[in-house]
Image: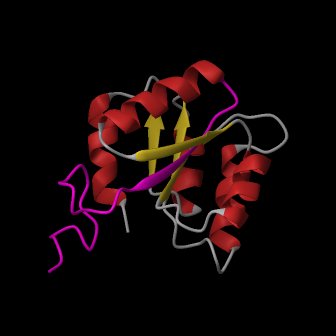
Amino acid sequence: MLSPRGPKACGGGAADRQIHVLAVDDSSVDRAVIARLLRSSKYRVTTVDSGKKALELLGLEPNVNMIITDYWMPEMTGYELLKIVKESSELREIPVVIMSSENVPNRINRCLEEGAEDFLLKPVRPSDVARLCNRMR
């Protein structure tokens, strides 16, 4: 039987499949914060420090249920990562959430128009993580 949110329950009991989130941020402090918040909500978390490493991991690990990425990173921004994921036939169904410490409305709108599920302002709070459950597919 499917839950009201679909086949996967968030933070549910032992019978539920653990949801795997890929967290991408070039800041080790921000990676640690988001990983701690996600793990406290019973998500399985893999962290990487760049968009390029995220794409490498996605090629090796097909069972990622959500990507949460910083907007500003060297080499590849979170926005560029979002575009690559959404243009890929293999990856486009994975929800992508963008995070940023800067509240820039046109940047937020551009990310959402490009297919981001949500845009979180840093510092990310437990209430933000709780809201992510509804974004899972």
Outermost residue on the top side: it is: 29
Q: Magenta region, mostly helix, strand or loop?
A: loop
Q: Position of residue 60 (x, y in %)?
A: 70, 64
Q: Residue visible at 45% across and 23% down?
A: 123
Question: Is residue 101 at all visible to an observer of this figure?
Answer: no
Identify which residue is drawn at 67% across, 50% down. Answer: 79
Image quarter hosting the C terminus: bottom left
Q: Picture quarter containing residue 10?
A: bottom left
Nearest the eye: 133 or 12: 12
Q: Range of the magenta residues?
A: 1-27
5 within the magenta span: yes
Residue at the image point whose x is 36% and y is 62% from the top: 136
Direction from residue 78 to residue 117 in the image, left or right? left
Q: How many marks?
A: 0
In the picture, measured across the screen, residue 52 lies left or right of residue 104, that is right
* In this view, 137 is above or below 134: below
| Residue positioned most to the front | 14
Q: 3 above or below 126?
A: below
Residue 121 x %, y % = 46, 31
In this picture, residue 1 sits left or right of residue 22: left
Residue 7 percent across, percent down from the top left: 27, 73
At 21% from the left and 63% from the top, the residue drawn is 15
Q: Position of residue 43 (x, y in %)?
A: 37, 46
Task: From the viewer's side, name the closer residue of 95 and 120.
Answer: 95
The reply to whether residue 78 is visible in this rendering is: yes
- Taking the magenta stretch, the answer to whether it contains residue 33 is no
From this view, report whether residue 13 is shown above or below residue 29.
below
- Quadrant of residue 55 in the image? bottom right
